[in-house]
Amino acid sequence: MIQIRIHGRGGQGVVTAAELLALAAFKEGYFAQAFPAFGVERSGAPIQSFVRIDNQAIITREQIQEPDILIIQDASLLHSSEVLFGIKKNTKLIINSPENPKTISQLLNKKIPAKNITSSPATEIALRLLGKNIVNTVILGAFIKQNKIIKLKSLLSAISEKFAEKDQSLINKNKAAITEAYTYVRK
Amino acid sequence: MKKNIKTQFLEGSNAVSLTIANIQPDVVSAYPITPQTHIVEDLAKFKAQGKANYEYLRAESEFAAASIVVGASATGSRVYSATSSQGLVLMMEVLYNASGLRLPVVMTVANRAVGGPISIWNDHSDAMAMRDASWTMFFAENHQEAVDLHIIAYKLAEEFNLPATVNIDGFILTHSFENVIIPSKSDIKKFLPSYKPALGTYLNPKKPVTLGAFFTPEHFWLEKKRIDEDLKHIITVFPKYYKDWKNILPSPISVKACLDDGLTEYCGPKNPSTLLVAMGSVVGTIKETLRHNKNVGILKIRSYRPFPKKSLQKIAYQCKHIAVIEKAMSSGAYGPLYSDVAASLPHFKGITSNHIVGLGGRDINIKTIQNIIKSAKRAQIKFW
């Protein structure tokens, strides 16, 4: 079982990101589970969401205590003790940040080595392609690149399904942003 | 598995609303409250999109919503409502009337703590507030059970003329996504025929009747006794109905239960030394904790009302320790489930303990369950 914990702030689509990842995994034939941990329901409050992916039915409901993968949508949360709670030796991190993995590892007092960190300039991509700082879909492109669990195709298909009632141009923009985050190479 | 059956990946609320739409009620009325909101929003949307034929009435309060479905049910309609927490408490007077008038109202309770202090999160204090309202009360462990139990709830409600509620843990089930199979209208029809009460049993000018009349002391107790007998009678038919339904619709969940009579489900060794008893979504986390445990078993109470005394006795009398894990507390006494379990086992010689968990959304993790098992050798009541 792979356990993923996503951290962000209210209004950033933290919950939707978990749903999209799990839906993409389901499309590949996995059992999946996605659920949120709402704090107070207001914009800007730290929020977590959780994803489990497995080959067999997932029955546990506990919040993820020891994540295999951490996704941080908002770098300002990096210093909150909740974010690094329960990390293991091999926990991987995907973070929305223009900084390189080495700098981020130093910011974390090397609790996660640079080789396990993928940093994605998701805010920059989102502002350019979506016109607003909503990075939840964008950062999933970086997730797909780092972890070969789910194919890009399945994630794009999950976007089409989840946003089916939204404007087609919005769907296309999100897909383009995900693809850019997926193909992004840090110079 | 049958070819036409398709597993979908859905939010719990969405799974419930799609199932309700396929059950085809005549009247839906509700007032939105967290965490029930997505269910009633979905049902309103289906109606607005022309995908459903029910009358949808958004009430001005939960008291009104409950009154609307009680009134509609009294005219012989199949009805549905859903609520949570303070909303359920506001309905309370009407809930007692629904059972007293013998109306087959079906309602989802998306379980949430009753304030104050204010909490939007999950526990079972709302369900326990209606425990004595003479409703059938079921608790779902996962999305598939939530789906199945709604269909069984309608079947039993309409056959026994008693209202029924399906409890699903707020957020944990209502806002989570997982694999689930939604039955089609025709699948449901095989088990649950259209609701056609006999003329003279509901309000109809062709054959006028009185519902909810005044009962003098000579008759009131007899009516209450009859409701109790009818509720208990459900215990005898539930296992067959559950089996019949599961033959129509399989589950995507592969965890095999050792014993499953519908009312309860037991997972664990043949002769457990410690038995855990619990309801709702926490049972999943308990099963995960016990995956390789050879001494401890878990009995899930699916039907809380009527209470499956015999199913419990069958397994419990062999054990040394019984630990009841529940998300509600009757302050000053015990947890409500513990009281029922203890009262059902007058000849039990071992040790019983009561563990109050998950109040107001407090996360229940595997470590907590492990610690509860360790402490089950002591007779005690403990908050975790």
Image (cartoon, coloured by chain):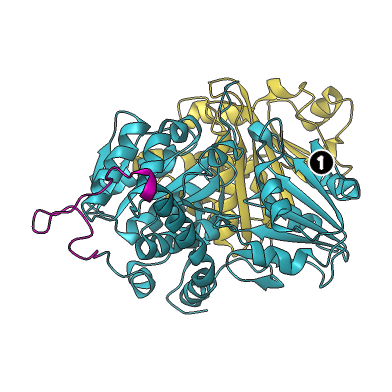
Provide residue B4's location: percent of width, then percent of height: 42, 75
Amino acid carrying mark 1 in the image: Asn
For the colour cyan, the matching chain is: B
Residue occupying image coordinates x 39% and y 33%: B32
Is-magenta flag for residue B200? Answer: yes
Q: Is residue A92 above or below residue A30?
A: above
Mark 1 neighbour density, 10 Å: few (under 14) some (14–19) many (20 or more)? some
Provide residue B334's location: percent of width, then percent of height: 72, 39
Residue occupying image coordinates x 75% and y 67%: B315
Q: Mark 1 = which residue? A: A116
Q: Is residue B93 visible?
A: yes
Q: Quadrant of the C terminus of chain B?
A: top right
Relative to B291, is B21 on the left or the right?
A: left
Shade representing chain A: yellow
Q: Nearer the viewer, residue B251 or B130?
A: B130
Please identify the quarter of the rendering in which residue B62 is found: top left
Check disc 1 and report its element: helix, strand or loop: helix
Q: Is residue B305 above or below residue B71?
A: below
Please identify the quarter of the rendering in which residue B348 is found: bottom right
Residue occupying image coordinates x 53% and y 60%: B144
Q: Nearer the viewer, residue B207 or A174?
A: B207
Give the letter of the chain under mark 1: A
Provide residue A169's location: percent of width, then percent of height: 36, 40
Please identify the quarter of the rendering in which residue B230 is found: bottom left
**The residue positioned farthest toward the front in the image shown:** B218
Is-magenta flag for residue A124? Answer: no
Query: Which residues lie in the magenta part?
Result: B196-219
Q: Is residue B265 visible?
A: no
Provide residue A32's location: percent of width, then percent of height: 62, 56
